[in-house]
Amino acid sequence: MQELRTLSTQKQLIKLNLYLNGLQAQFDDVIHKKEENWATPKEFLSVGFGDCEDYAIIKYYSLIELGFSKERLYLTIVKENFRGGQHMVLSYFEKQGQAPLILDNLSFKVLPLNKRKDLSAEYFINEYGVYTMRKNGTLEKSPLHFKEFEELRKRIEKGL
């Protein structure tokens, strides 16, 4: 993390994504014996394995630790357009009005969402709420809540 602090924003995103993507992927049902488990960064690193949510979460909190604005970072539930199903990535809105940059455990490239034809964003989640994206690219607050994120934040506050 110390080394990353001296780099440009773009290089921080690329290097962090590359480094964390080197950790072993494994589905929750194998690791935790349940279908869905959002691990804290500490839990993810302790176990040594994680799934897409765990990668997005550790990237979210690592970038906050590096000084990135919480208002620009979102855990993002996406639809996988070619394979079907849902997936989670981290979105970083570098500039308002531009497509967010996507940090994905399935890709070593950090690309804008509009260049990721394989993904369609469904929900953007951070501690300020849950959002959907309008056709013009702006975010609109949703009344939805993700209990998994609320429970995750409580566990992080407890130091887990």
Image (cartoon, rainbow, N blue to C red):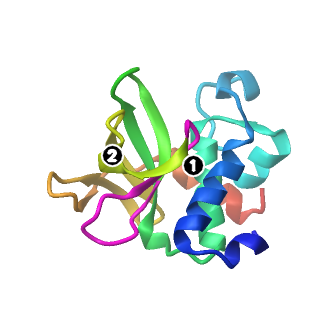
Specify the amino acid type for callout 1: Ala
Q: Position of residue 144 (x, y in %)?
A: 33, 49
Image quadrant holding the N terminus, namely bottom right
Residue neighbourhood size for the residue with mark 2, other residues' Cα within 10 Å, grouped as few (<14), some (14–19), many (≥20)? few
Q: Earlier in the sequence, mark 1 or mark 2?
A: 1
The residue beneath circle 1 is: 56
Specify the amino acid type for callout 2: Lys
Q: Which residues are magenta?
A: 91-107
Q: Position of residue 35 (x, y in %)?
A: 60, 25
Count the marks. 2
Is 96 magenta? The answer is yes
Q: Is residue 89 above or below residue 91?
A: above
Q: Secondary structure at mark 2?
A: helix
Q: Position of residue 157 (x, y in %)?
A: 69, 65
Give the residue drawn at x 61%, y 52%.
17
Q: Is residue 153 visible?
A: no
Q: Is residue 126 left or right of residue 16?
A: left
Give the residue drawn at x 18%, y 54%.
134
Disc ID at residue 115 = 2
Q: Position of residue 104 (x, y in %)?
A: 53, 44
Q: Secondary structure at mark 1?
A: helix
Is label 1 or label 2 in front? 2
Query: 104 or 129, which lies in front?
Result: 104
Is 76 magenta? The answer is no
Residue neighbourhood size for the residue with mark 1, other residues' Cα within 10 Å, grouped as few (<14), some (14–19), many (≥20)? many
Quadrant in the rendering for residue 154 = bottom right
Q: Is residue 157 above or below residue 53?
A: below
Quadrant in the rendering for residue 118 = top left
Q: Is residue 75 left or right of residue 54?
A: left
Are the residues flagged by discs 1 and 2 in contact, CB closer than 8 Å? Answer: no
What's the CA distance linking mark 1 and mark 2? 19 Å
Give the residue drawn at x 77%, y 56%.
160
